[in-house]
């Protein structure tokens, strides 16, 4: 057995694939380029076409569907092809199947092919299923005798016994695909070419199709070339894979490694520099990163809120309930929770969730505050709370969030005394800046005021701020505060701090840098944890302020779909010189996949001196003098200024 180095990501050799030297090459794709001509102008008739041709004015644009692609598939391989839509995957399969002849290069196939590329091609929808079985079999080159011998097997696999004599036009698209798949796999080929056919039919039939292909692989030694958008499927079925992007080879190697790289950087926008930095971190060896990070991806957002509250629940006598999809209410609730030392939980609009009921029973609060009118939290929510023997409830029922902000501010003064020295003023839509500020707002007794298009409301905000606060933080995200409000704030005598940017990720960075500067000025310990959320609907983060304050964390927004965003987070971790000892990911795998989490965790471990190119460094004494020590695992809750 010898090692064969394959072409790999960005021209650098990253992976080694072991092959038997004497393994038969079943498919040899050698520097294949496929160019299509696209008409550069619209011709509306054959006459116009003939005239343009005669005048030599017929112009075409060249589209390179594939550009110098090479790979080999050996006997017994299950070889996967990955790539975004339009990257050339299906074109590559058609070249292998002989449907297309490459413009340059060659493709040599050694063996009988069964191509599952376009299921159902050639079906006559007016004929019955029985008739179409024979028709489609003939188009695939099967003798009539072969179809007769395998007819019952085909019908049984397709599960259409009761509908054989029904015209195919009365079938659902899934049932048609079942018949087509059953016919195409009736023969045992030497090479099976599969293009997205494992998604046919319902879930149970998809599993059945996959089992059929696995049987061909394991029991008949069939070589398989497969295209699928399901990375997990490619990783599960294939031993090797190639990633093609915009016609170019991006990476070849073990399916596990190619799929992992594709999940993290495939099809995502960004600069080559950001891509290189991410790949460098990906190459650090760490099989299982899960034990080194936290993922708050509970069954639902309400259990996530309880999970976060458990980090700071003590002997609080007040609980707050808020609809977590109402960000303005969440920001105000966080502000008051810090002022009154309350526990913050979320609830659906319709009724109190079971986990919230259980938490109320456990804490036994004397009062529950509800944020939002009867449309934000239905009366049934309040009714459910009262049934839990809570002494009293209070609802902030202003439909206008700017008015609610004043109601919360006045309630806080009446029941919790004076607020701190800083206030926040923003439109409630400035979510990136406000989410980022939540730990600071909670820890520093900061009221939040919402700007409004109504001058009277804005004048009320100016009156509330004037003479009562030393500093006003103005948050602007793509929308400036009304001129009247800005002029009034400037005249109130307080220091004005503007945190502004149209881009959510940029505003998040600016705001966190400001928070860290304030902590340093106040002599507080640096944060040692990062809570990561996405900028699109960061719904779990809306109630994460008290939790972030309790565990000494900043809330960092990252968009895994943008390479430069991931690269910026890697740099953020690196710049803290080993001071970050935990990452907390908010939301399920649809927000951050396991591979997204693994990349950031690897960087954290590398910066802390716990991971290098050889793997984990578990012995503290094995570190060099220049490597940072691990930070305290039990930091104290940050205090206000």
Image (tube, rainbow, N blue to C red):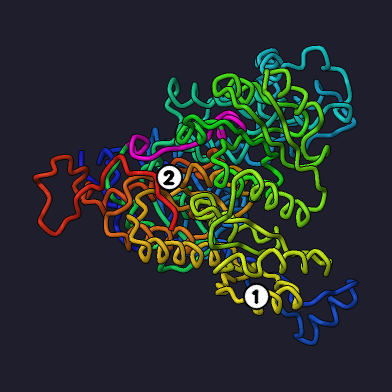
The quadrant of the image that shows the N terminus is top left
Q: Mark on residue 391? A: none
Dot 2 or dot 1: first in sequence order is: 1
Q: Mark on residue 492? A: 1
Residue at the spot 68% in from the left edge and 24% down from the top edge:
391
Q: CA distance from mark 2 to mark 1?
A: 45 Å
Q: Which residues are magenta?
A: 288-305
Query: How many neighbours does mark 1 have within 10 angstroms: few (below 14), some (14-19), or many (20 or more)?
Result: many
Helix, strand or loop under label 2: helix
Is residue 300 shown left or right of residue 582?
right
Q: Give the camera-side residue of 511 and 107.
A: 511
Is residue 78 shown left or right of residue 589?
left
Image location of residue 428, percent across then percent down? 70, 58
Residue at the spot 47% in from the left edge and 55% down from the top edge:
265
The reply to whether residue 600 is visible in this rendering is: yes
Is residue 587 shown left or right of residue 485?
left
Q: Give the camera-side residue of 336 and 63.
A: 336
The reply to whether residue 259 is visible in this rendering is: no
Residue at the spot 53% in from the left edge and 39% down from the top edge:
589
Q: Which residue is mark 2?
A: 597
Magenta-colored stretch includes residue 299: yes
Q: Give the camera-side residue of 465 and 33.
A: 465
The answer to which quarter of the image holds residue 517 is bottom left
Look at discs 2 and 1 and give the one toward the viewer. Answer: 1
Q: Give the camera-side residue of 10 and 486.
A: 486
The quadrant of the image that shows the C terminus is bottom left
Image location of residue 322, percent across then percent down? 68, 39
Image location of residue 181, percent across then percent down? 66, 28
Where 324 sits versus 71, above or below? above
Helix, strand or loop under label 1: loop
Magenta-colored stretch includes residue 30: no
């Amino acid at each position: 057995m010898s090692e064969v180095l394959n072409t790999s990501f960005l021209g650098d050799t990253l992976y080694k694939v072991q092959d038997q030297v004497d393994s038969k090459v079943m498919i040899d794709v050698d520097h294949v380029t496929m160019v299509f001509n696209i008409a550069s102008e619209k011709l509306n008739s054959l006459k116009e076409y003939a005239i343009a041709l005669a005048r030599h004015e017929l112009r075409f644009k060249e589209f390179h569907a594939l550009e110098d692609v090479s790979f080999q598939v050996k006997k017994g391989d299950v070889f996967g092809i990955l790539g975004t839509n339009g990257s050339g995957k299906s074109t590559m399969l058609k070249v292998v199947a002989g449907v297309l002849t490459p413009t340059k290069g060659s493709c040599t196939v050694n063996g009988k092919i069964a191509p599952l590329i376009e299921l159902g091609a050639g079906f006559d929808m007016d004929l019955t299923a029985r008739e179409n079985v024979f028709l489609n079999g003939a188009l695939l080159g099967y003798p009539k005798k072969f179809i007769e011998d395998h007819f019952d097997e085909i019908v049984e696999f397709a599960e259409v016994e009761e509908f054989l004599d029904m015209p195919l036009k009365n079938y659902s698209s899934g049932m048609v695909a079942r018949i087509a798949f059953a016919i195409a796999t009736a023969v045992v080929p030497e090479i099976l070419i599969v293009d997205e056919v494992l998604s046919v039919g319902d879930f149970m039939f998809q599993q059945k199709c996959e089992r059929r292909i696995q049987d061909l692989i394991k029991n008949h030694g069939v070589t398989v070339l497969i295209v699928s958008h399901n990375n997990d499927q490619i990783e599960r079925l294939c031993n090797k894979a190639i990633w093609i992007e915009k016609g170019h080879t991006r990476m070849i190697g073990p399916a596990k490694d190619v799929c992992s790289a594709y999940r993290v950087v495939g099809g995502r926008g960004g600069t080559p520099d950001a891509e290189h930095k991410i790949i460098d971190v990906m190459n650090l060896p760490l099989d299982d990163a899960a034990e080194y990070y936290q993922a708050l991806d509970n069954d639902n957002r309400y259990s996530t809120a309880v999970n976060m509250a458990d980090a700071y629940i003590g002997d609080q006598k007040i609980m707050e309930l808020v609809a977590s999809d109402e960000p303005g209410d969440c920001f105000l609730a966080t502000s008051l929770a810090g002022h009154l030392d309350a526990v913050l939980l979320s609830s659906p609009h319709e009724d109190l969730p079971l986990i919230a009921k259980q938490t109320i029973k456990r804490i036994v609060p004397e009062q529950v505050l509800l944020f939002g009118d009867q449309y934000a939290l239905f009366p049934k929510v309040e009714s459910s709370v009262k049934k839990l023997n809570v002494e009293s409830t209070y609802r902030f029922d202003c439909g206008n969030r700017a008015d609610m902000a004043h109601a919360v501010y006045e309630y806080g003064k009446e029941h919790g005394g004076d607020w701190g020295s800083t206030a926040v003023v923003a439109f409630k839509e400035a979510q990136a800046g406000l989410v980022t500020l939540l730990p600071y707002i909670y820890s520093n007794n900061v009221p939040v005021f919402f700007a409004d298009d109504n001058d009277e409301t804005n004048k009320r905000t100016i009156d509330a701020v004037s003479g009562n606060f030393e500093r006003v933080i103005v948050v602007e995200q793509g929308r400036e505060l009304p001129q009247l409000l800005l002029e009034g704030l400037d005249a109130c005598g307080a220091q004005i701090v503007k945190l502004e940017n149209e881009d959510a990720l940029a505003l998040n960075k600016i705001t966190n840098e400001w928070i860290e500067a304030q902590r340093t000025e106040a002599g507080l310990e640096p944060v040692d944890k990062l809570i990561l959320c996405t900028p699109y609907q960061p719904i779990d983060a809306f109630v994460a302020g008290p939790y972030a304050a309790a565990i000494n964390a900043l809330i960092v927004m990252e968009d895994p779909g943008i390479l430069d965003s991931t690269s910026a987070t890697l740099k953020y971790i690196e710049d803290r010189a080993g001071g970050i000892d935990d990452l907390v990911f908010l939301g399920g795998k649809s927000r951050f996949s396991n591979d997204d989490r693994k990349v950031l965790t690897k960087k954290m471990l590398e910066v802390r001196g716990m991971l290098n190119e050889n793997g984990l460094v578990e012995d503290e004494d094995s570190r060099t003098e220049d490597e940072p020590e691990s930070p305290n695992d039990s930091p104290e809750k940050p205090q206000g200024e």
